[in-house]
Image (spheres, helix red, strand yellow):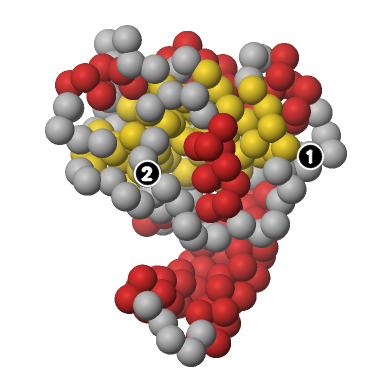
Amino acid sequence: MIKISCCIITMDQADRIEIAIRSIKSYVSEVVVIDGGSKDNTVKIAESLGAKVYTKKWEDDFGSQRSYSIKKASNDWILVLDSDESIEFGDGINFEKIILDNPDYDGFRFTRANYLDKKQTGSEFDFDKQIRLFGRHGYYNDKIHEVVKGLKSIKDIDKSQCLMLHYKSKDEQRSHLLYQKKLIINNIKELEQKLDLSEEDKKRLVYEKKMLEVWDTWWQDAK
């Protein structure tokens, strides 16, 4: 049996965390929740569902929270899920089967369907791709738009086999986007102030500027 740890980072998600945990609980060996300091019942609900909950103060760094969740996980395979996401499988499919059927891969990318107020906007951002299942040697080092690094071979999983569902209200999305824009601008400033940029830094700077360009499109979808 392949043991998988599901890692979730939270902050005031009492109205969502139960759906997220229940959608994956029967497919993983443990659920690890890293809470950034919720003031609602997020922690209590997660613990009542059997999750191992740890607190790590939120410091505007998604990658740091993700990395801490991997550190606290017990198993060799990691599933990353956000607290406002859930999973739907096709018949006969589960995470263990995906891993066993694809022994040459150490990472798996899933399609995510994005909904605002339970509806899709019709834009190109209604669907995206996310690497969410990987060997625990994978790691994060970006504060925002964090991407798993250190993987050798990644396989795309067809959405008929496994689809991620991502729900936000438009109010939540607008709040998130304003916060996200602040972080993107701060990251760009930090990188531009460096005297000697590494190749990784240069790639990151290009990527963050690209994200700032498409931010307006995300904002229009959330209006």
SS assignment at label 2: loop
Horizontal side of 40 relative to 69 (left or right) equals: right
Looking at the image, is 8 positioned above or below residue 64?
above
The three-letter amino acid code for the residue at tag 1 is: Ser
Depth order, front residue of 75/176: 75
> Is there any visible trace of residue 216 in the rendered image?
no
Quadrant location of the N terminus in the rendered image = top left
Horizontal side of 128 relative to 107 (left or right) equals: right
| Distance in Å between CA atoms under marks 2 and 1 | 27 Å
Residue 171's mark? Answer: none
Q: Name the residue that disc number 1 marks.
A: 38
Give me the residue at 17% from left, 27% from top: 102
Q: Name the residue that disc number 2 marks.
A: 138
Q: Position of residue 183 (x, y in %)?
A: 61, 68
Give me the residue at 36% from left, 40% from top: 137
Looking at the image, is 196 positioned above or below residue 132?
below
Which numbered disc flags the more N-terminal residue, 2 or 1?
1
Query: Few, some or many C-alpha atoms within 10 Å of disc 1 (few <14, some 14-19, many ≥20)?
Result: some
SS assignment at label 1: loop
Quadrant location of the C terminus in the rendered image = bottom right
Where on the picture, by quarter, is residue 84? top right
